[in-house]
Amino acid sequence: MSQTVTPTTPATSSQGLDYEAAVNRYFAAWNAPDPAERERAVAAAWSQGGSYTDPLCDVSGHAQIAAVIAGAREQFAGYTFQGTGLVDGHHHIVRFAWELVSEADGSAPVAGFDVMTLDEDGRARAVLGFLDRAPAV
């Protein structure tokens, strides 16, 4: 007999990490409109040696992460990253889905999900991004 397990999504881990807050800081970095604000947001979201890897890049450190975000914001001006669904986590790991949404018409040409490992302060050590939907290049 098989048993169905329904996952629960606690707001915090047994180590006291706030998964929702970590994801909110992450989106704040991706949505920061100017370089100075972006630098502050990246520092708040990622640990000093943190990394970001997706099918298009593999970078580490605040400066490289901020540069990737600046490039995405330039390519998709007028779009914001928004979470979709629940934030799910355990231990020092959190996963969440997202879309890149047009502020003009609400379309979302890019979507995916990310898995993030957190340090003891709740900042990202590493983010692994997966693209579920992306425009053809």
Image (cartoon, rainbow, N blue to C red):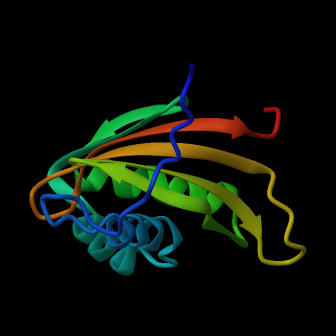
Task: Locate residue 55: give its quadrant.
Answer: top right
For the residue pair 115 and 60, the one nearer the viewer reads as 115
For the residue pair 95 and 58, the one nearer the viewer reads as 95
Residue 63 at x, y percent in the picture: 27, 54
Q: Residue at x 42, y 72 (%)?
A: 24
Query: As drawn, which residue projects farthest toward the right?
Result: 105
For the residue pair 64 and 118, the one nearer the viewer reads as 118
Residue 84 at x, y percent in the picture: 64, 61
Q: Is residue 30 above or below residue 115?
A: below
Q: Residue at x 23, y 67 (%)?
A: 43
Query: As drawn, which residue projects farthest toward the front?
Result: 1
Task: Locate residue 104: give its quadrant.
Answer: bottom right
Residue 117 at x, y percent in the picture: 27, 45
Residue 62 at x, y percent in the picture: 25, 55
Q: Residue at x 69, y 59 (%)?
A: 100
Give the left or right position of residue 15, taking residue 21 as reference.
left
Can you say which quadrant of the picture contains the N terminus? top right
Q: Residue at x 79, y 32 (%)?
A: 137
